[in-house]
Image (cartoon, grey):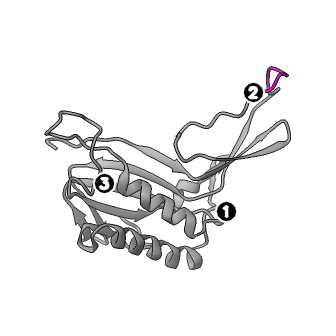
Amino acid sequence: MSSINIGIMQFQHQITLHCESKQHQIFARHSATVRPKRTNRGSFGGRRKQTIKSMRAVVQRVASASVEVEGRTVSAIGPGLLVLVGLHETDVEADAEYICRKVLNMRLFPNEKTGKTWDQNVMQKSYEVLLVSQFTLYGVLKGNKPDFHVAMPPEAAKPFYASLVEKIQKAYRVDAVKDGVFGAKMK
């Protein structure tokens, strides 16, 4: 890649929609946009409240990326994917396996042989992955103040995040998957 290519995708494994005081669970595995089922009543009569109840990953295609903690570079990659991972308090192993599969198999890179632009995944290109824990992906504004109450608590999130990193390393290559420092102030 000659310049930094940016493509952001959010994956939400399980989504709960609150419409007309009924709760609908949708497993959004193939679509980034979830629309509630239309009813014969026409309008929903007000705002719809959408509550996300699972791990989030924001994926960015990069020419290079690095993580600095206290002025020291702790991880760096060349071309590949920068993945910001937010853990929800209700996340389970199935969510981690889903994110692992999606991150490694998303076809975000061009295939020079065929000329197709969105044709190859990070493994086919032998690129690298940089994972960064990011609890702020579950931030909600309450007035003017951010609230992170639905993010997984740090004492549970640290081992869960470490297992996610390990899962992605095993599924790909240990040397090609790097991460930041959990809980540190990273640049």
Marks 1 & 2, CB-CB < 8 Å contact: no
Check disc 1 and report its element: helix, strand or loop. loop
Q: Quadrant of the N terminus?
A: top left
Residue depicted at x 57% and y 79%: 155
Mark closer to the chain start, 2 or 3: 2
Quarter residue 67 falls in: bottom left
Check disc 2 and report its element: helix, strand or loop. loop
Check disc 3 and report its element: helix, strand or loop. strand
Residue density around tag 2, few if under 14, some if 14–19, many if 20 or more, within 10 Å: few
- Residue found at the very far front of the displayed protein: 114
Mark closer to the chain start, 1 or 2: 2
Marks 2 & 3, CB-CB < 8 Å contact: no
Q: Which mark is residue 81?
A: 3
Q: Position of residue 177 (x, y in %)?
A: 30, 67
Q: Quadrant of the C terminus?
A: bottom left
Q: Is residue 103 left or right of residue 56?
A: left
Residue density around tag 3, few if under 14, some if 14–19, many if 20 or more, within 10 Å: many
Residue density around tag 1, few if under 14, some if 14–19, many if 20 or more, within 10 Å: few
Residue 142 visible within the image:
no
Q: Mark 1 = which residue?
A: 149
Residue depicted at x 62% and y 60%: 148
Residue 100 visible within the image:
yes
In the image, the segment drawn in magenta is 39-43
Quarter residue 70 falls in: bottom left
Q: Is residue 115 left or right of residue 47?
A: left
Disc 3 to disc 1, how far (Cα)? 28 Å
The kind of secondary structure the magenta stretch mainly shows is loop
Q: Mark 2 = which residue?
A: 38
Disc 1 to disc 2, how far (Cα)? 31 Å
* Residue toward you, 43 or 4: 43
